[in-house]
Image (tube, rainbow, N blue to C red):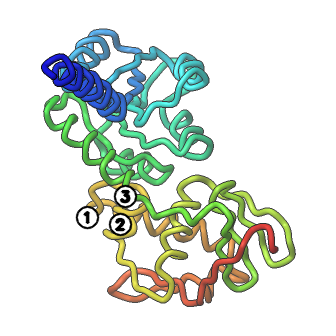
């Protein structure tokens, strides 16, 4: 009897150990790609972030960052603007349009116009050097949390239909009423998804920025206005007189049409 009980105990311990290991495997640390040509900042920062529970990969240039991205996809990119060769703005534009990765700029350029340019092309936040490392960690975690709350993607066999348009969320492919594919960036896709998930609802700028790009919104209203303008140019018959995405003065924007779901294989 004792040997049976001890055998059960060992079995439970082994199972418990496997379950614990599985839980640990399911909670792997967030992966960061840190891109900065200044070793005196990059290396200590990478060490600090590693101590805070992040898995950090370093790159000294945009070219090296592109190589790293081919090997593995991080959860977030920390990106310097001023680098030899391709600058951070160009790399950010590439990441936003092709990788759909959250980006936080690390840069010594702190003027408002520089911040707005970075945010308008799709960066999620902007931290000016020198910065407090604990603040950067808080911003990283905030962006990661908000990215996880992005608009939900419909089930695999569903497309979203509105006014003759069709969006395939899995392929991120937008089809116009004539059947032609219309290219949209990752930011435009997320913005369109936000509207399609909330038709005929007023979405203010703060909420849109939180849903689409997850950054501190109150200083950067112009960023979402520009993204809406770009999306209007893609889907409106006359972007100067928009009928689909309407401005609600003092409130924000609203998709002024109904949305229905349709099986992809039935289209």
3 or 1: mark nearer the eye? 3
Q: Quadrant of residue 51?
A: top left
| Mark 3–mark 2 CB contact (< 8 Å) | no
Q: Is residue 3 left or right of residue 126?
A: left
Q: Is residue 197 above or below residue 21?
A: below
| Mark 3–mark 1 CB contact (< 8 Å) | no
| Mark 1–mark 2 CB contact (< 8 Å) | yes
Q: Is residue 179 left or right of residue 59?
A: right
Q: Which residue is mark 3?
A: 149
Which residue does the image show at 29% across and 11% down from the upper left? 43
Marks 3 and 2 sit apart, C-alpha to C-alpha, by: 20 Å
Which residue does the image show at 31% across and 69% down from the upper left? 206
Q: Is residue 2 left or right of residue 233?
A: left
Q: Which residue is mark 1?
A: 218
Q: Is residue 124 left or right of residue 193?
A: left
Query: Residue 92's spot in the image, x, y percent?
Result: 51, 38
Q: Which residue is mark 2?
A: 221
Circle 3 SS class: loop
3 or 2: mark nearer the eye? 3
């Amino acid at each position: 009897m004792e040997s049976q009980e001890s055998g059960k105990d060992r079995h439970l311990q082994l199972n418990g150990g496997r379950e614990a290991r599985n839980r640990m495997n399911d909670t792997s640390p967030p992966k960061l790609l840190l891109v900065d040509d200044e070793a005196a900042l990059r290396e200590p920062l990478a060490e600090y972030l590693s101590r805070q529970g992040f898995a950090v990969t370093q790159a000294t240039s945009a070219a090296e960052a592109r190589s790293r991205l081919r090997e593995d996809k991080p959860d977030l990119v920390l990106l310097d603007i001023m680098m030899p060769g391709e600058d951070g703005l160009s790399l950010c534009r590439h990441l936003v349009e092709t990788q759909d990765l959250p980006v936080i700029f690390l840069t010594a350029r702190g003027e408002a116009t520089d911040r707005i340019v970075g945010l308008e092309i799709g960066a999620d936040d902007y931290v000016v050097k020198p910065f407090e490392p604990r603040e950067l960690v808080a911003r990283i975690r905030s962006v990661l949390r908000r990215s996880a709350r992005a608009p939900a993607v419909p089930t695999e066999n569903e497309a979203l239909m509105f006014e003759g348009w069709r969006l395939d969320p899995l392929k991120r492919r937008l089809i116009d009423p004539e059947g032609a594919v219309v290219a949209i960036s990752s930011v435009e896709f997320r913005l369109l998804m936000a509207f399609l998930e909330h038709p005929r609802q007023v979405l203010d700028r703060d909420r849109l920025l939180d849903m689409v790009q997850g950054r501190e919104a109150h200083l950067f209203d112009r960023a979402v206005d520009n993204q809406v303008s770009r999306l209007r140019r893609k889907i409106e018959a006359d972007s100067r007189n928009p009928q689909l995405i309407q401005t609600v003065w003092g409130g924000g924007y609203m998709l002024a049409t109904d949305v229905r779901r349709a099986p992809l294989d039935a289209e």
